[in-house]
Amino acid sequence: MCHRRTWHDFCRSAGVDRADFSAPLIPVLRSANLHQQALETVSATTKVAIEHLGFSETIGDPTIILDYLRGAVTTDLHEGQWREKWLNVIAWAGGFRPGDESAGRAFLDALRAKTSSL
């Protein structure tokens, strides 16, 4: 997916011709076994998406997201709480207030204000 950089390009390469949605792809989770070239592709895709959205922070160590989700697995969360967790990590991956556990909803508000999508 990261080689495509936008949902439009990804959908077209997957054979979906009517994809008119040009939002950037934002890698949220990544394999722990990526080779250097793949890591560079993921990083470049993330950077382009963050710049497109107009944010500037980066998560730094991407294992923070995985650790955050792993920690949540050991708790008894309901569907709404999981939604909040996922919104947070999507926000963090998108360069919006990394590490802030209230970033998810604020990220959606910021995207609405910018009329951006991902």
Image: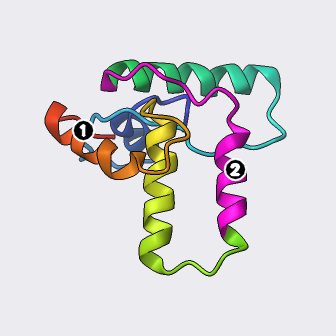
Q: Quadrant of the N terminus?
A: top right
* Labels 1 and 2: the sequence-earlier one: 2
Q: Is residue 73 left or right of residue 23?
A: right
Q: Secondary structure at mark 1?
A: helix
Dot 2 amino acid type: Leu
Mark 1 crowdedness (10 Å alpha carbons): few <14, some 14-19, many ≥20? some
Magenta stretch containing residue 115, yes or no?
no
Q: Is residue 75 visible?
A: yes
Q: Residue at x 39, y 50 (%)?
A: 104
Q: Residue at x 67, y 75 (%)?
A: 75
Residue assigned mark 1: 111
Q: Residue at x 66, y 53 (%)?
A: 68
Mark 2 crowdedness (10 Å alpha carbons): few <14, some 14-19, many ≥20? some
Q: Which residues are magenta?
A: 53-72
Q: Is residue 20 visible?
A: no
Residue assigned mark 2: 66
